[in-house]
């Protein structure tokens, strides 16, 4: 135990003590249904009305046991979400941009020189701007006021696309991302669901819930 905890002991709030299995299971099922079965995108039905609405109503999918809360479009750069941690000195606060699950990563995949699609490049450039924004000392006071704490410890994640295409272009995908957008992570919708399934499995191992 830390010296701070010994001096000032307090109740430890663990997910497996306050959340029920069915809550997490239902959360995962709702997320799966959202990205697999939602109505077609059009002018009125877009990322904000479908995907943002889903995450705002189903916060557990983004937070799991990794974050305590999020801010939604709260900085000048208007990143979709900033995921907040309880221990910013140790754990990374995350800029998290949400794009559609039908984003195409590559064009000309059957040629000798597959290329990132223009939409995908645009999304990555957007996240790179968030990275530059979070690393600029001039923006620290604004970020601190929005988060409620001071930190220089950030991750930058783009949620987009499907796992099948990412795996299809696996080696080139990693090389191109590291070469052109170092420090940015791309997570597909299936991968985000898998993170939540792993969280659910860990929760079940630790839970003392009585059926």
Image: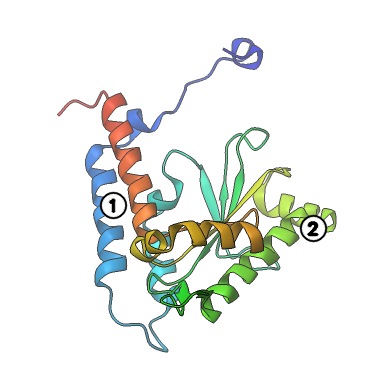
Would you say residue 75 is visible in this rendering?
Answer: no
* Quadrant of the rendered image containing residue 189: bottom left
Secondary structure beneath label 2: helix
- How packed mark 2 is, by other alpha carbons closer than 10 Å (few <14, some 14-19, many 20 or more), is some
Q: Give left or right: position of 22 versus 84.
A: left
Q: Which residue is mark 1?
A: 28
Q: Position of residue 187 (x, y in %)?
A: 46, 57
- How packed mark 1 is, by other alpha carbons closer than 10 Å (few <14, some 14-19, many 20 or more), is many
- 176 versus 144 height, above or below: below
Secondary structure beneath label 1: helix
Residue, x 58% and y 74% (percent of image)? 121
Residue, x 29% and y 44% (percent of image)? 24
Q: Give left or right: position of 69 versus 91.
A: left
- Name the residue furthest bottom: 43
Residue, x 62% and y 65% (percent of image)? 127
Q: Nearer the viewer, residue 62 or 147?
A: 62
Q: Position of residue 106 (x, y in %)?
A: 47, 74
């Amino acid at each position: 135990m830390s010296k701070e905890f010994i001096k000032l002991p307090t109740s430890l709030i663990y997910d497996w003590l306050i959340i029920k299995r069915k809550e997490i299971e239902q959360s995962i099922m709702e997320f799966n249904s959202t990205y697999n079965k939602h109505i077609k995108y059009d002018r009125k039905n877009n990322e904000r009305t479908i995907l943002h609405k889903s995450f705002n109503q189903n916060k557990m999918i983004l937070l799991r046991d990794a974050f305590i809360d999020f801010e939604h479009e709260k900085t000048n750069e208007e990143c979709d979400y900033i995921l907040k941690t309880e221990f910013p000195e140790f754990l990374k606060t995350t800029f998290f941009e949400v794009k559609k699950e039908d984003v195409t990563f590559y064009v000309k995949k059957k040629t000798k020189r597959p290329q990132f699609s223009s939409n995908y490049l645009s999304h990555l450039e957007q996240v790179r701007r968030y990275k530059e924004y979070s690393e600029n000392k001039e923006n620290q006071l604004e970020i601190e006021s929005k988060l409620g704490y001071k930190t220089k410890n950030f991750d930058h994640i783009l949620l987009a696309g499907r796992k099948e295409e990412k795996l299809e272009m696996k080696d080139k995908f990693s090389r191109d991302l590291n070469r052109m957008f170092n420090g940015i992570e791309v997570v597909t919708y299936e991968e985000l669901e898998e993170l939540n399934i792993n969280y659910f499995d860990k929760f079940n191992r630790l839970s003392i819930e009585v059926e």
